[in-house]
Each structure stands twice: as C-alpha cells, then as structure tokens.
Amino acid sequence: METPLPPRTRRARHWRRPESVSVKNSPSVKAPVTSHPFEYLDHTADIQLHAWGSTLGDAFRSVVMCMFHYITDIETVAIDPLQSIEVTVAGHDLESLLFAFMDEFLFRFAADRIVCKDIEFLHVDTQQFAIQAVGQDSKTCWNLRECLSLT
C-alpha cells in the first residue's frame, strides 16, 4: 500500500507591501504586489482563486483581479485610459452571478486579449442578481498564461 503524499503548502496572501519596508535583504517575493486582497490555493488539476473584500463589489473585483494576476503580471501592463470595456451580467443567485462576471472577463481576454487593471462598478443589484461594471483594459500584453475555463 502506497503512503499518501504530504499536503501541499499554501501560497502567501497578496497584500500591498508597505512603502517603508526594506526588501534588500529579504528573500525574493514571487507574489504580485496589489491592493486587491486575494490568494491562490493549490488544487489537484487546477488553481483555486480565493479573494475577499469589505463589500460584495470589492470581493467580486478582487477575484477578477486575482484571475488577471494569474494570467499575467498586471503591474507591467500599460493601460490606455481612453479605452474601457463595459460588462453587464446577471445570474439567478450570487454564485451564478460571480461565475457570469468572471466568465465575461475571461471571454473578453480570450477573444480580444483584453486585460483589465481595475474595475469600477456602475450598478450592483443583490436582489435581481445583476452587475454593470467598467474595466480599464489593455491590448498590448502578450506574456500571458492560458486560462481555459472556469469551473
């Protein structure tokens, strides 16, 4: 009988590093520097995105930004402030709303190579489960990882 593998270690949470901290003698940090609180969790065949926020909109923004941080290094993406994409999605509950929200941004990435650096919510309706948001985008980033689908 085979012995089970040891559990995988969890990756660090991704918080913005304070400006006053010196990192000269620190070990190299692989986590992206971001103001959106999220972390990646290991999964057998995929990756799990874990994000949170003080409001529903903040949590939804954080999980989409987590997805884009996994796809590319967002800090190196040049944003065109004149370009933006509007996303309107609906669901029948919060889980389907989150799935539709993430799926729409993933579709825009797959179809047009649009990577959003920030998302602004125009309308969040928790009774009808609908979101209208605007994302700042860039079409110049090509050092990307493939994200096949949401599950």
Image (cartoon, rainbow, N blue to C red):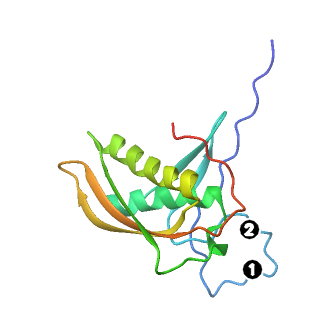
Query: In the rendered image, is residue 95 in sight?
Result: yes
Which is more N-terminal, label 2 or label 1? 1
Q: Residue furthest front?
A: 112
Q: Residue furthest bottom?
A: 20
Residue at 59% in and 67% down: 139
Q: Residue furthest top?
A: 1
Please provide percent x and percent y for residue 138. 56, 70
Residue at 55% in and 52% down: 111
Please provide percent x and percent y for residue 77. 63, 73
Please provide percent x and percent y for residue 35. 51, 72
In the image, residue 112 above or below residue 148: below
Mark 1 is on which residue type? Val
Residue 35: assigned label: none
Mark 1: which secondary structure? loop
- Asked whether 114 or 68 is in front, the reply is 114
- Asked whether 53 or 84 is in front, the reply is 84
- Image quadrant containing the N terminus: top right
Category of crowding for the residue at label 1, using alpha-carbon neighbours closer than 10 angstroms: few (below 14), some (14–19), many (at least 20): few
Task: Check if mark 1's residue and mark 2's residue have beta carbons within 8 Å.
Answer: yes
- Asked whether 45 or 150 is in front, the reply is 150
Category of crowding for the residue at label 2, using alpha-carbon neighbours closer than 10 angstroms: few (below 14), some (14–19), many (at least 20): few
Q: CA distance from mark 1 to mark 2?
A: 9 Å
For disc 2, the marked residue is 29
Query: In the rendered image, is residue 12 in sight?
Result: no
- Asked whether 136 or 1 is in front, the reply is 136
Quarter of the image holding residue 58? bottom left
Mark 2 is on which residue type? Val
Quarter of the image holding residue 57? bottom left
